[in-house]
């Protein structure tokens, strides 16, 4: 029996209207400002690259696009990342990051077990979503 690991979910309320939050999570410039450099264009089916520093370039492909509420893409060989937005009122937006595709039997392209990397990523996303993203959007 295959053991799937739980997806990583991070939710935060941003002090920004949904249109501003959407630009931050669905454009190359926006994502580069709080996460990592990339060649993303918000077009369904479009392939792009995440420039992951020491880990090299990761191929990605947009598989979900529902502006300004959700964008999702396949990342590398196993992962899926989705950014979900929900307007709470005119000045605040709830943002949820969902990182799925974890499998206890798989390893990353760099030979690291998902069981280990999931923990590392979980901690990394905590800081990125709860510190870097709001600093960029609200700054």
Image (cartoon, rainbow, N blue to C red):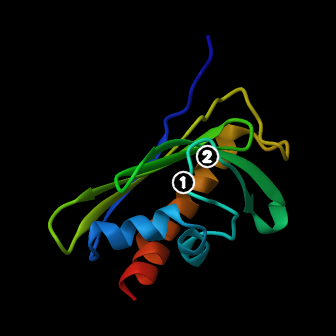
- With 133 as the anchor, is 75 left or right in this view? right
Task: Identify the residue shown where x is 37% and y is 69%.
Answer: 21
Mark 2 touches mark 1? (CB < 8 Å):
yes
Quarter of the image where the C terminus is located: bottom left
Secondary structure state at the residue bearing disc 1: helix
Q: Quadrant of residue 137?
A: bottom left
* Residue 45, above or below 125: above
Give the camera-side residue of 56 and 106: 56
List x then y, in percent, for residue 62.
59, 45
Q: Residues within 10 Å of mark 2 (few under 14, many from 20)?
A: many
Give the camera-side residue of 52 and 127: 52
Which of the labelled discs sits on residue 77, or is there none? none
Furthest-bottom residue in this view: 139
Secondary structure state at the residue bearing disc 2: helix
- With 64 as the anchor, is 48 left or right in this view? right
Label 2: which residue?
A: 118
C-alpha span from label 2 to label 1: 6 Å
Give the camera-side residue of 16 and 45: 45
Which of the labelled discs sits on residue 122, or is there none? 1
Q: Residues within 10 Å of mark 1 (few under 14, many from 20)?
A: some
Quarter of the image where the N terminus is located: top right
Task: Identify the residue shown where x is 52% and y is 69%.
Answer: 128
Task: Identify the residue shown where x is 73% and y is 44%.
Answer: 76
Furthest-top residue in this view: 1
Q: Quadrant of residue 15?
A: bottom left
List x then y, in percent, for residue 47.
70, 48
Furthest-left residue in this view: 89
Give the camera-side residue of 98 and 41: 41
- With 19 as the anchor, is 72 left or right in this view? right
List x then y, in percent, for residue 111.
85, 42
Furthest-front residue in this view: 43
* Residue 95, above or below 8: below
């Amino acid at each position: 029996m295959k053991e799937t690991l739980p997806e990583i979910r991070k939710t935060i309320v941003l002090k920004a209207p949904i249109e501003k939050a959407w630009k931050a999570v669905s454009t190359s410039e926006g994502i580069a400002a709080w996460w990592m450099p990339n060649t993303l264009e918000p077009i369904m089916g479009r392939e792009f690259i995440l420039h992951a520093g020491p880990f090299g370039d990761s191929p990605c492909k947009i598989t979900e696009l529902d502006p300004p509420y959700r964008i999702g893409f396949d990342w590398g060989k196993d992962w899926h990342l989705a950014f979900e937005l929900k307007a709470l009122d005119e000045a605040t937006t709830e943002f949820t990051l969902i990182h799925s595709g974890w499998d206890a039997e798989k390893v990353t392209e760099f030979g690291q077990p998902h069981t280990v990397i999931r923990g590392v990523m979980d901690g990394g996303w905590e800081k990125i979503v709860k510190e870097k993203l709001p600093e960029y959007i609200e700054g």
